[in-house]
Amino acid sequence: MTEPLLEVRGVHAGYGGSAVLHGVDLQVGAGEVVALLGRNGMGKTTLVRTICGLHPAKRGEVVFRGERVDATAPHRVARRGLGLVPEGRQIFANLTVEEHLSAFERPRAVPVAGERDVGDPGPAGAKRGATTAAQRIDRVWTLFPRLRERRGHLGSQLSGGEQQMLAIGRALVTEPRLLILDEATEGLAPLVREEIWRCLAQIRASGQAILVIDKYVQRLIGLADRHVILEKGRVAWSGSSAELAKDASIWQRYLGV
């Protein structure tokens, strides 16, 4: 892997006097897809919130695009190029689909001194920084035609699957360097899950770096380059998709499948 886009170094975090993360290390490289796995309550969402600046780290470092961000406000972390699709989607009930995308749309992430612009492709293959607001939103319509059909519908009028598509589209119009999905297909019907997986494969093919949490390990094996398993707030295992696919004991020991 090249120099990491995201590097989590020995992060400890918790709530009040309760420790949740115990020295977690994690890396995501440019253009890489990493799956964060583990049973419920093992610290996955706490780690995501810590990376995004939504929860403070008690110890350790979070480095994103070469700069420590573990003491940085969430909006500043986002401005550096981190796009979050949160657990539960968090769609605004009184905004239309189009208003969601327009409200969150912005050009490429703030530049970083010394970082070479390699013209990373966006979801539709266009270079970063070379698109208009309309083009960035049009990429989402192309990726999720159902959202185009419902562009005038309020968030409260969308199905769970449509809300998840909107949450992903809302993150993509920020042209993130790293896209994080917390529970990518939780609570969705099988046909809708398949549509989300198809779209994530397209996003990956564009060169987008992704950190994804989901319980459907078999689908993640087909999507991700590497996997990191958390067990009681610690990294219990990490390795490639090929390594995870061939060792069923890992699934049974840490994932309950």
Image (spheres, rainbow, N blue to C red):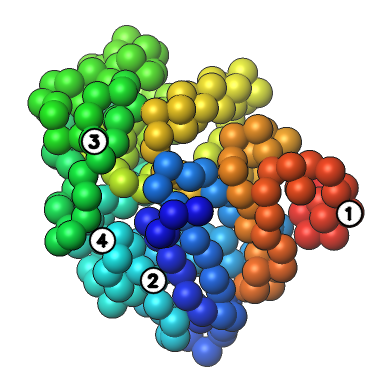
- Choose top left, top right, bottom left or bottom right for residue 237: bottom right
Q: Label 1 sits on what residue type?
A: Ser
Nearest to viewer (mark 4 / mark 3): 3
Between disc 4 and disc 3, whose residue precedes?
4
Residue 9, horizontal then vertical, whole percent: 47, 75
User: In percent of the image, x 58 and y 67: which residue is there?
Assistant: 43
Q: Which residue is mark 1?
A: 249
Cα separation between marks 2 and 3: 25 Å
Cα separation between marks 2 and 4: 11 Å
Q: Which residue is mark 3?
A: 119
Is there a contact, CB below 8 Å, between mark 1 and mark 4? no
Between disc 2 and disc 3, whose residue precedes?
2
Residue 179, horizontal then vertical, whole percent: 39, 45
The label shown at residue 77 is 4
Is there a contact, CB below 8 Å, between mark 2 and mark 4? no
Q: In the figure, is residue 192 to the left or right of 111? A: right
Q: Which residue is mark 2?
A: 62
Cα separation between marks 2 and 1: 31 Å
Q: Secondary structure at mark 2?
A: strand
Cα separation between marks 4 and 3: 21 Å
User: In percent of the image, x 52 and y 89: which residue is there?
Assistant: 17
Q: In the figure, is residue 40 to the left or right of 210? A: right
Q: Nearer the viewer, residue 163 or 168?
A: 168
Between disc 2 and disc 1, whose residue precedes?
2
Q: Secondary structure at mark 3?
A: loop
